[in-house]
Image (cartoon, rainbow, N blue to C red):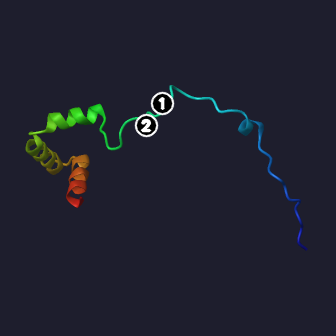
Amino acid sequence: MVEEYPSKVLQPSNAEAAPKEIRGRPFERGNPGRPRGSKNRTTRLLEELVAGEGEKVAQKVVELALGGNVKCVVQLRTLHAG
């Protein structure tokens, strides 16, 4: 025997009907925020520090990987695969 369940009509709750509060300071109209692809300040500073030192940094990573540093091994595998 198949039991029939009464169909329920979903009603919006009071929470959905209430206006949402704005969290934080919203962007002004027409201000799209940070441009797509722009880098964080920390990333830019790190790139400036490493610029010109790339070969030394790569050699150090290889040395650490050969010494058993697992994170350096993973980093080398990631760079090699890409």
What is the spatial separation of the Cα atoms under label 1 and label 2, in whole angstroms? 8 Å
Pick the front one: 6 or 9:
9
Q: Is the residue 80 above or below the residue 51 in the image? A: below
Residue at the spot x=17%, y=35% of the render? 48
Residue 6 percent location from the top left of the image:
89, 59
Element marked by disc 2: loop
Neighbor class of circle 1 (other Cα within 10 Å; few <14, some 14-19, many 20+) is few
Residue 36 percent location from the top left of the image:
35, 43
Pick the front one: 32 or 19:
32
Residue 32 got which mark?
2
Residue 8 image-quadrant placement: bottom right
Which one is earlier in the sequence, the residue at label 1 or at label 2? 1
Residue 12 percent location from the top left of the image:
77, 44
Quadrant of the frame with the C terminus: bottom left
* Kind of residue at badge 1: Phe
Residue 38 image-quadrant placement: top left
User: Residue placed farthest to the top in the image?
Assistant: 25
Quadrant of the frame with the N terminus: bottom right
* Kind of residue at badge 2: Pro
Residue 27 got which mark?
1
Neighbor class of circle 2 (other Cα within 10 Å; few <14, some 14-19, many 20+) is few
Disc 1 + disc 2, Cβ < 8 Å? yes
Q: Is the residue 76 above or below the residue 12 in the image? A: below
Element marked by disc 1: loop
| 41 to the left or right of 28 | left
Q: Is the residue 22 above or below the residue 6 in the image? A: above
Residue 72 got which mark?
none
